[in-house]
Image (cartoon, helix red, strand yellow):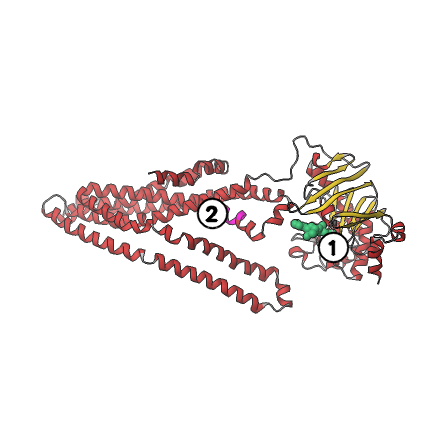
Amino acid sequence: MNKIIKKIKNLHIVQNYRNIYPYIKPYWFRSLLAILVTFPVGTMDAIIAWSLKPYMDVVMIEKNLSSSAYVPLLIIVFSVLQSGFNYAAAYLNAWAGAKISNGLKCDLLKKLMRCEAAFFDKNASGLIQARFNTDVDTACSGLLRNVNMVATRIFSSSSLICVLFVNSWQLAVVAMIVLIAALYPLSTIRKRISSIVGKTLFSSAAIATYYIEAFNGNRVIMSYNLYDYQLHRFFDTLEEVFRLGIKMIQRTGILSPMMHSIISVGIAIIIWMGGYLIANHQLTAGGFVSFITAVLLLYQPIKSMGNDVNLVQQSLIAIERVFELLNETPAIIDKPNAVKLESIKNSIEYKNVEFEYVKNKPVLRKVSLKIKVGQTVALVGNSGGGKTTFVNLLPRFYDIKSGNILIDGLDIRDMELDSLRDKIAIVFQDNFLFTGTIRENILLGKRDATAEDLDLAIESACLGEFVKSLDNGLDTEIGERGILLSGGQKQRVAIARAFIKNAPIVILDEATSSLDNKSEAVVQLAIENLMKDRTVFIVAHRLSTVKNADKIVVINHGKIVESGVHSTLIAKKNSAYASLYHMQLT
Ligand SMILES: Nc1ncnc2c1ncn2[C@@H]1O[C@H](COP(=O)(O)OP(=O)(O)O)[C@@H](O)[C@H]1O
Ligand SMILES: [Mg+2]
């Protein structure tokens, strides 16, 4: 008993129910109906078994047709009804299950999009896919379907057991003993397979990864001729899944034949005892047939019950994992009294900023920098020095460990996050474009932009000519992640997107460094248009592009080692900037 209570506690049913109820609530009526129809579905088998008794006794033995003519009719009516209810159950399950999981999926995506950058650093995309999609389906549709199934089995087996006892309690007791003996091996099945199930899930997920890699990594596979290499690794994983599958069969395959043998012995005993009871007039022939039918019908629901309970358990585990994600508060959110950032009037200041991605591995060490509105600051330095990190702190992709980042004297952590990010346009080295057209991608910067805004953005991003050359112009599809565009074209679409946003702060992080010289020249022009009249942080790999900045800052190993304008830095003795600069010229 204690064991059972513990098991039930482990399912956290109340907690899970409390979590999922808001999602069921809008569809509670259909969900309930889906469970309720299992009652008639479950009891139909018993009714059919039970009606065999009068049929046998009255028609077959007494040869009296008139008083039992209703029996075949009854069977037809009930079978039709059963089919109807089964249909209703399948429909209601699918409907309510999908609606509930859609609600949950929307909330999960909302959550996912609000997760901080560190969350995405930590979690692989495959895992997110599994957590956000597969788990939700298992949790919602699966739960309803499986609860439904278990309920049907319970109604079905309990009503069949009633038929057994109504016909003959002596035989019923024997049948129950046989059933319990036959089912006992099933209760050990969990122990036998639990370790294999875990490994199988893991390997099966690995199989999916190979398809994803074949898709996303196809260029690399082609250029390094990785066909055989990938195929071998894939084959090894397949073999592993095969090995586990066989192991599973070895451990479970014996159970079914074993149950069959026990049941056969049981039926033999029942037939022998039944004959005895009939001879002693304790049982009619019809009662006996009805009894045997009920025993046979009982076998299926009872056999499947263990499996179905396991499935319910899996759904509950999935719910738990989903809500673990859903109930987590994102690390970077608005404070209760957050202030809306309306405009930027004076300055942006980094004050003794310390930051680390990993505990005790400082990436920025007491960095201070102040720039006035309208100025351009260029960040240069060795790779890995912390330039990208520095600029990513301003839109709060990450929060700093200590110090302050202030806009007009107000800490950015005291501002409304959305209003802060509204003021910043960013162009990265590798910009994510969404599936859709050029127009749609540019308008992401400002969804209510006018036609003039759009034209201006396109001209400023030097996209005009390119767009004109396309048959479909702005409505040309750019493919997944913009794969149909060249590097320079992609970059200019990203610049147009940033331009149309018309944000007072612009961050450019190595925006031209992945381009060839020719595309770089035109993207450079687009960037200069974007920088006009704004406060700009530019991280540049080529120093020729930063010469005109109001301030040049050299960041090495997380520290600002030098700052000033080009002419003074270059003239300084032992200047880090000068050595970087001369290194690039040679
Ligand atoms: N998401 C991250 N998680 C952990 N460490 C990171 C992450 N991004 C960058 N780093 C580390 O922080 C340091 C600074 O990186 P970064 O700011 O990208 O340098 P830069 O842009 O100057 O080349 C590097 O040592 C890098 O390995
Ligand atoms: Mg960088």
Q: Position of residue 16 (x, y in %)?
A: 46, 38
Q: Quadrant of the N terminus?
A: top left
Work out whether residue 39 can be spotted.
yes
Q: Amino acid at mark 1?
A: Ser
What's the magenta region? 131-135
* 301 and 220: which is toward the camera: 220
* 74 and 160: which is toward the camera: 160
Name the dominant secondary structure of the magenta segment.
helix
Is 584 a magenta residue? no
Location of mark 1 (residue):
383
Seen in the picture, residue 198 relative to 95 is either above or below; the reply is below
Check disc 1 and report its element: helix, strand or loop.
Answer: loop
> Mark 1: is the Cβ under 8 angstroms from ligand 1?
yes
Q: Amino acid at mark 2?
A: Thr
Q: Position of residue 149 (x, y in %)?
A: 37, 45
Seen in the picture, residue 16 relative to 134 is either above or below; the reply is above
* 293 and 516: which is toward the camera: 516
* Side of 394 relative to 314 (left or right): right
* Side of 308 relative to 135 (left or right): left
* Side of 417 relative to 561 (left or right): left
Mark 1 or 2: the one toward you: 1
Q: Position of residue 190 (x, y in %)?
A: 37, 50
Location of mark 2 (residue):
138
